[in-house]
Image (cartoon, grey):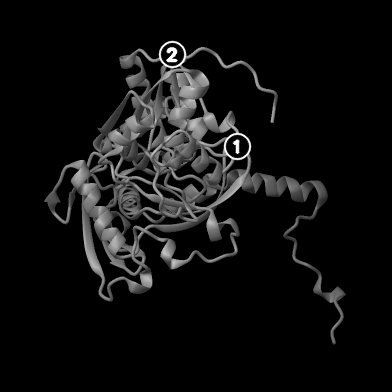
Amino acid sequence: MPPKTARPKVNKVVLAYSGGLDTSVIVPWLRNNYGCEVICFCANLGQEEELAGLETKAIASGASKCYIEDLRLEFITDFIFPTMQAGAVYERKYLLGTSFARPLIAKRMVEIAEMEGADAVAHGATGKGNDQVRFELTVMALNPKLRIIAPWREWEIRGRKDALDYAAEFNVPVSATEKSIYSRDRNLFHMSHEGGLLEDPWNEPEEVMYTLTTSPEEAPEQPEYLEIDFKSGTPVRVNGVARGALGLFEELNRIGAKHGIGRIDLVENRLVGMKSHGVYETPGGTLLYEAHAALEQLCLDKETLHYKQMIGLKYADLVYNGQWYSSLRKALDAFVQATEQNITGTVRFKLYKGNAILVGRKSPFSLYREDYVTFDQDDVYNQQDAEGFIKLFGLPMKVEGMLTREGVGVTDYDTPDYSKFKRD
């Protein structure tokens, strides 16, 4: 441990609070080590954890008050939908469910700190993960005057037993239930799993680990058809029924989970430099990403679609790295929103045992025209025009080939002299 230094004076701190063991212990730890008033804040992002009684628990732990706020709608419209529209996927598979939840929590934490006149904020993220960066970069971007306290980087608590002992010493009410071997994060968009058997990436995840989705083997024996309608890049109907953003997402989660949609297994590169192995369940989000991409196939021209694929990679990096409130992400959003104007139409899937099989898409803005691609005679495309196009398109390669032959008289593609080879 590095030598201890005097802690700065803090009068009031807002803590991102879940009610779990770690954040419950952080409340008295902040009071004991900073001598400050502690205000707790819990965001409801659809984690389905018991929120009733959380305020009482926070105050019993030493907090002066506790905010509990439902941010699910803002989560969907301002974070999930823009990331989906950008086509942002981290390292080919991860749909960023935890990554874009943290800046929303941190944003509201900053707002409460300003409203309460607090001079600091605190979080329970560890010093090994990505979340510490996501929380703190958001605070730095939105109110750099606020002090940030990260107890896991300061205290001497090193495990569950230490935390339980600290809780007992300061009369913190904590659950006596056995802790899962897995580290999980859940919200409306996904469930993530790390630790336990997953620490060895050779191990097959055990079925009892999954909490949202049905096993593909246990999914219905008959496929189910699903239609999603979009208007300007935003989903508006499921199976023809208009729904608000929250109701729509809950319905897609229900249907996708029933058919085992959205399970992925990924060894990813953390921002802090190490690799981690995680399993994610993202039923509704997977369906939305696939449906949106299917409409883009119809409605975006080649150059825009290809450029947007590059934008999606950068967008994913920014979100994963906690740079949601960066100028670059805002600028990329402007590009993305310009591409969304014609993403209107319907996508149809056949869902069967873990697979979302694309079986149809249509749009009034479709750039696909059957009469243009037909092999029958038409007035739009003259096949003889292809000859001149190929000659011009291939001209650089032809010139390079001519210069190579004239220079050395041989190329990598010269026909070998088979007479030099002996026959058996």
Q: What mark, if any, has residue 272 been given in the picture? A: 1
The residue tagged 2 is 11
Q: Label 2, label 1: how many angstroms apart (C-alpha)? A: 31 Å
Lower position in the chain sequence, tag 2 or tag 1: 2
Residue 347: image location, x then y, percent: 25, 55
Residue 73: image location, x then y, percent: 24, 37
**Image-based side of 411 in relation to 81, left or right:** right
The three-letter code of the residue at mark 2 reads: Asn
Residue at the extreme left: 241
Query: Could you tell me which quadrant the C terminus lies in?
Result: bottom right
**Looking at the picture, does residue 140 appear above or below residue 312?**
above
Mark closer to the observer (2, 1): 2
Residue 399 is at least partly visible in this image: yes
Please name the residue shown 59% across and 40% down the image: 158
Residue 197: image location, x then y, percent: 55, 61
Please name the residue shown 21% across and 53% down the image: 251
**Image-based side of 410 in relation to 119, left or right:** right
Dot 1 lies on which element? loop
Which quarter of the picture shows residue 62? Answer: top left
Query: Could you tell me which quadrant the N terminus lies in?
Result: top right
Q: Nearer the viewer, residue 89 or 49?
A: 49
Q: Nearer the viewer, residue 414 or 147?
A: 147
Number of other residues with Cα within 10 Å of mark 1, as a class: few under 14, some 14 to 19, many 20 or more? few
**Image-based side of 203 in relation to 281, left or right:** right
Label 1 near label 2: C-beta < 8 Å? no
